[in-house]
């Protein structure tokens, strides 16, 4: 697992210092959110579709053992090899075995959040194997040595000039900073790799149990190339990605692209049922599916968080989150960002002490829950995570003492009254033009970045007693 | 080992002693959609509008003679010689061979990648989204629709369906290893959210609707 998440403050500050990030994230998330509003309105009955999405995903979770077995059996019958990985290490060992067997030196990938979660690229690079991301955004951040800052638009924080600089460094040639030229460069560079690579790696948006199939939603076409050009195709699949049949895949195809990019459907949806069939001239000769647990069954066993497994990784909660929109994806410290990342990260890491601070990257406004196509109560889970983190003793003793004092004082009417009076008098040195400024910690933590409203001379209780209210 | 362990964990999490292997299928009805009540002409028009809306070029012809003429015009416009084209070796496209025997009909990835246009037959033309559903097979190669910079596909009335669900009903039970749904050209907005057409797949997607196959 990656190192702890203790430097949340540092990452927030670095997001604020970034010259371009906040503007880019705001504009991109606005665009994605607005497009989603248009296409969901055009489809009509969006709430009904969301309810159906929730119902289907719940049904899958409640019958996950049945559907996973069905899926695995069908894929085996259709000639694919199915592997099961309890931990990240298991998954990497299985994958390494496949890479070794084919003596691969180049592995071409299309976007897969699970492979990000497992840090597949690092492990390969450590062994001298070149793993190349073929999604344009992923390719850019890979050249920059960074992680995705958005689930759907990974390089949301990069300007075209920065991209041109990265491509210049990669090619040793001058690159024009216009999107068409930059895209053309990536196409040419990666096309040859597609033709050369012995192994293609993809994620799995949905796994259809009956008949066994893996469905991928992509726009650039790299998903299609990765799955049909290299002789070996490896699929990394989170074990909750299942849908029962094509009927439910149809419903997911209504929800996912609309929620993710505001498209009615992505340019490509590939449904792959195994290695190439008899007589077929193209398509992978060998198909491997690595079904990854890596903490998911632990989440399944916890009724407080089980519903998070309904997630279809659309990223629409990111686009509406007032915190994500200010700090971007890297602040969350791991591969999943936004409200879903704030919930998933401590759960998948199984570590509230080092990773639980992500649960504070929220205003608890509930916009995420409202945006979610499968109605995951994300903001309620964030409250729950905070509660568990506090109970587990992860918060500082100063914070615990402060809140205990606060609760004892305000729980008692006389002490509450006294505290208001005391506060009114105590605030006077920091009063400036009708608000508070400066002051000692912890007041300064607030007043350094915004105004703090002062305590009124006459409290609500006073005015109530006088009959003014 | 791992399989048993994972399935065991799931069963335990769901409160059962052993992993379950049966379940009742979920019952539900789909919310109503605008395309539900369209007739055939309306469905074709809906397809055309959706397809044009995602930067596709749509042509409607009466018969194969006209289709061949249309293809000739497309070749001229895009400056493509017949030997620079790859196409599926399927019976539906047979009239094409008579006119253009030079077209490459094999499925070699390297050769196909060097062609300027790939020509396919659409097994399901989905009106709701302007989507082309293509079944892969020994004569219908996957690379033809994705490797060359231009993709041209043909279909007739029988292939026209209203929705993705209808396409799955019709094609899902067939014996295939890959079913590709293609909606317009390859696209990305990964650099500053600026839409760019033609990344790894074709930048140009054209469709010819043949009214009567004769």
Image (cartoon, coloured by chain):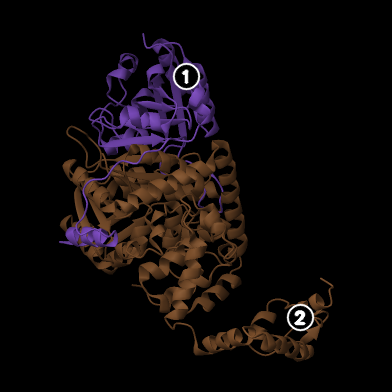
Chain colours: A brown, B purple
Check the picture and name the quadrant holding the C terminus of chain B.
Answer: top left
Label 1: which residue? B73
The residue drawn where x is 32% and y is 67% is A122
Quarter assignment of residue A439: bottom right
Q: Position of residue A239 (x, y in %)?
A: 30, 55
Q: Residue furthest top?
A: B214
Q: For mark 1, give the secondary structure.
A: helix
Quarter assignment of residue B95: top left
Q: Are marks 2 and 1 on the same chain?
A: no
The residue drawn where x is 43% and y is 13% is B211
Q: Is residue B30 above or below residue A127?
A: above
Q: Residues within 10 Å of mark 2 (few under 14, many from 20)?
A: some
The residue marked by circle 2 belongs to what chain? A
Q: Nearer the viewer, residue A69 or A417?
A: A417
Q: Nearer the viewer, residue A344 or B209?
A: A344
Q: For mark 2, give the secondary structure.
A: loop
Label 2: which residue? A454
Q: Nearer the viewer, residue A386 or A160?
A: A386
Q: Position of residue A358 (x, y in %)?
A: 48, 71
Q: Position of residue B180 (x, y in %)?
A: 35, 36
Give the Cα separation between the discs numbered 2 and 1: 76 Å
């Amino acid at each position: 697992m990656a190192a702890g998440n203790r430097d949340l403050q540092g990452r927030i500050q670095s997001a604020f210092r970034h010259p371009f990030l906040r503007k880019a994230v705001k504009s991109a998330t606005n665009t994605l959110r607005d497009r989603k509003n248009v296409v969901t309105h055009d489809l009509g009955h969006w709430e009904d579709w969301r309810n159906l999405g929730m119902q289907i995903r719940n049904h899958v979770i409640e019958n996950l053992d049945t559907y996973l077995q069905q899926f695995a059996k069908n894929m085996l019958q259709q000639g694919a090899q199915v592997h099961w990985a309890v931990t990240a290490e298991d998954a990497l060992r299985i994958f390494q075995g496949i890479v070794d067997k084919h003596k691969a030196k180049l592995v071409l990938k299309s976007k897969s959040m699970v492979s990000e979660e497992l840090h597949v690229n690092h492990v390969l690079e450590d062994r001298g194997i070149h793993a190349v991301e073929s999604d344009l955004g992923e390719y850019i951040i890979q050249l920059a040595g960074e992680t995705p800052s958005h689930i759907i638009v990974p390089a949301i924080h990069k300007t075209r000039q920065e991209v041109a600089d990265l491509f210049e460094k990669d090619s040793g040639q001058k690159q024009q900073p216009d999107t068409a030229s930059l895209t053309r460069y990536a196409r040419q560079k990666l096309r040859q790799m597609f033709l050369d690579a012995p192994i293609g790696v993809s994620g799995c948006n949905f796994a259809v149990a009956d008949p066994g199939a893996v469905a991928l939603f992509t726009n650039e076409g790299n998903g299609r190339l990765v799955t049909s050009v290299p002789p070996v195709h490896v699929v990394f699949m989170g074990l909750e990605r299942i849908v029962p049949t094509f009927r439910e895949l149809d419903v997911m195809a209504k929800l996912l692209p609309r929620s993710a990019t505001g498209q009615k459907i992505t340019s490509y949806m590939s449904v792959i049922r195994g290695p190439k069939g008899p007589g077929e001239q193209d398509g992978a000769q060998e198909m491997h599916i690595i079904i990854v647990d890596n903490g998911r069954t632990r989440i399944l066993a916890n009724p407080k968080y089980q519903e998070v497994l309904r997630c279809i990784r659309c990223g629409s909660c990111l686009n509406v989150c007032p915190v994500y929109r200010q700090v971007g994806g890297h602040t969350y410290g791991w591969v999943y960002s936004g409200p879903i990342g704030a919930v998933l990260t401590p759960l998948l890491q199984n570590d509230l002490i080092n990773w639980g601070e992500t649960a504070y990257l929220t205003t608890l406004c509930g916009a995420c829950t409202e945006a979610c196509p499968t109605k995951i109560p994300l903001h309620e889970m964030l409250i729950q995570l905070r509660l568990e983190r506090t109970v587990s003793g992860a918060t500082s003793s100063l914070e615990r003492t402060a809140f205990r004092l606060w609760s004892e004082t305000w729980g008692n009417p006389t002490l509450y009254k006294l505290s208001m009076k005391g506060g009114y008098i105590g605030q006077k040195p920091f009063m400036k033009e009708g608000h508070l400024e400066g002051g000692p910690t912890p007041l300064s933590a607030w007043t350094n970045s915004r105004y703090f409203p002062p305590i009124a001379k006459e409290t609500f209780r006073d005015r109530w007693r006088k009959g003014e209210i | 080992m791992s399989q048993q362990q994972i399935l065991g964990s799931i069963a335990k999490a769901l409160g059962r002693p052993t992993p379950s292997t049966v379940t009742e299928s979920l019952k539900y009805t789909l919310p109503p959609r605008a395309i539900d009540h369209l007739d055939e002409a309306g469905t074709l028009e809906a397809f055309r509008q959706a397809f044009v809306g995602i930067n596709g070029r749509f042509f409607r012809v009466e018969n194969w003679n006209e289709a061949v003429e249309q293809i000739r015009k497309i070749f001229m416009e895009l400056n493509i010689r017949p030997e620079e084209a790859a196409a599926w070796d399927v019976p539906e496209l047979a009239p094409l061979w008579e006119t253009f025997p030079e077209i490459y009909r094999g499925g070699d990835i390297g050769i196909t990648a060097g062609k300027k246009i790939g020509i396919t037959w659409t097994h399901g033309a989905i009106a709701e989204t302007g989507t082309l559903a293509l079944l892969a097979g020994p004569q219908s190669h996957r690379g033809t629709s994705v490797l060359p910079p231009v993709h041209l596909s043909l279909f007739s009335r029988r292939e026209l369906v209203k929705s993705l669900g209808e396409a799955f009903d019709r094609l899902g039970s067939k014996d295939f290893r890959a079913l590709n749904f293609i909606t317009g050209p390859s696209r990305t907005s990964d650099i500053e959210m600026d839409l760019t057409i033609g990344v790894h797949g074709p930048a140009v997607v054209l469709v010819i609707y043949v009214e009567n196959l004769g």
